[in-house]
């Protein structure tokens, strides 16, 4: 049975790239919001967004942060990472900048979003614990194949890492 995971990503620039990863089928992901649904949630304010995220995280064993050019430092990405980690979920990053969007474009590699966090107990950077995988290809098809072939094992590894910390 496939693991249930939450996919965290910057919606506007990366929704197509995220859809590619979710459609790889190795894992059961959160229910994606369409453009109109996301706009409705956003218009209700921060509390509604937080409530939606919290609801999507329930019953998930891991969070997969899909890292695009502008993912690191975003308020809701940071919330999703912090909430996932504090709830004991596995957390893993996957760089998706070399996947093509609907216009057939790739993007620049973004920063590591885990650099923004330190463990309270030790002060250790979360980026030294949580892995962020950058597929070793520039071709979108090869990147997709690499992610599809490895995502399930990356999630399992993230769950094991979180259990040991």
Image: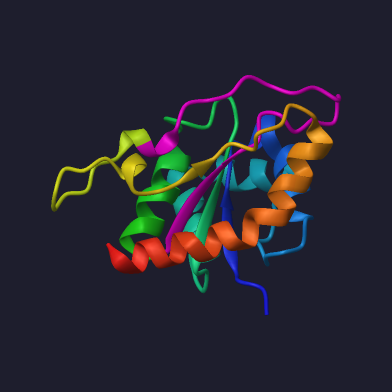
> Percent position (x, y) of residue 58?
49, 70
Quadrant where the C terminus is found in the figure: bottom left
Quadrant where the N terminus is found in the figure: bottom right
> Percent position (x, y) of residue 90?
44, 61
Residue 16, compared with residue 69, is above or below; it is below
Residue sitting at x 77%, y 43%: 144
In reply to whether residue 97 is colored magenta, the answer given is yes
Q: From the image, give the main secondary structure of the stretch colored magenta.
A: loop
Residue sitting at x 29%, y 40%: 117
Residue 141, compared with residue 33, is above or below; it is above
Say which quarter of the image contains residue 153. bottom right
In reply to whether residue 59 is colored magenta, the answer given is no
- Whether residue 11 sits left or right of residue 123 in the image: it is right
Residue sitting at x 66%, y 62%: 29
* Number of numbered discs: 0
> Percent position (x, y) of residue 73?
42, 30
> In this figure, which colouring scheme has been used for the structure?
rainbow
User: Which one is in front, 99 or 101?
Assistant: 99
Say which quarter of the image contains residue 69. top right
Q: Which residues are magenta?
A: 89-114
> Percent position (x, y) of residue 30?
64, 61
């Amino acid at each position: 049975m496939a693991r249930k995971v939450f996919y965290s990503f910057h919606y506007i620039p990366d929704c197509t790239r995220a859809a590619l990863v979710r459609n790889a089928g190795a894992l059961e992901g959160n229910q994606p919001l369409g453009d109109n649904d996301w706009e409705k949630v956003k218009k209700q304010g921060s509390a509604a967004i937080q409530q939606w995220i919290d609801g999507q995280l329930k019953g998930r064993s891991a969070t997969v942060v899909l890292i695009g050019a502008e993912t690191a430092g975003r308020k809701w990405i940071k919330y999703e990472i912090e909430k996932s980690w504090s709830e004991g979920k596995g957390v893993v990053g996957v760089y998706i900048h070399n996947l093509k969007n609907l216009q057939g474009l790739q993007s620049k590699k973004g920063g590591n979003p885990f650099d923004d966090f330190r463990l309270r107990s030790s002060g250790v950077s979360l980026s030294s614990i949580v892995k962020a995988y950058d597929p070793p290809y520039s071709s979108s098809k090869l990147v997709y194949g690499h992610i599809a072939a490895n995502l399930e094992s990356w999630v399992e590894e993230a769950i094991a890492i979180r259990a040991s910390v």
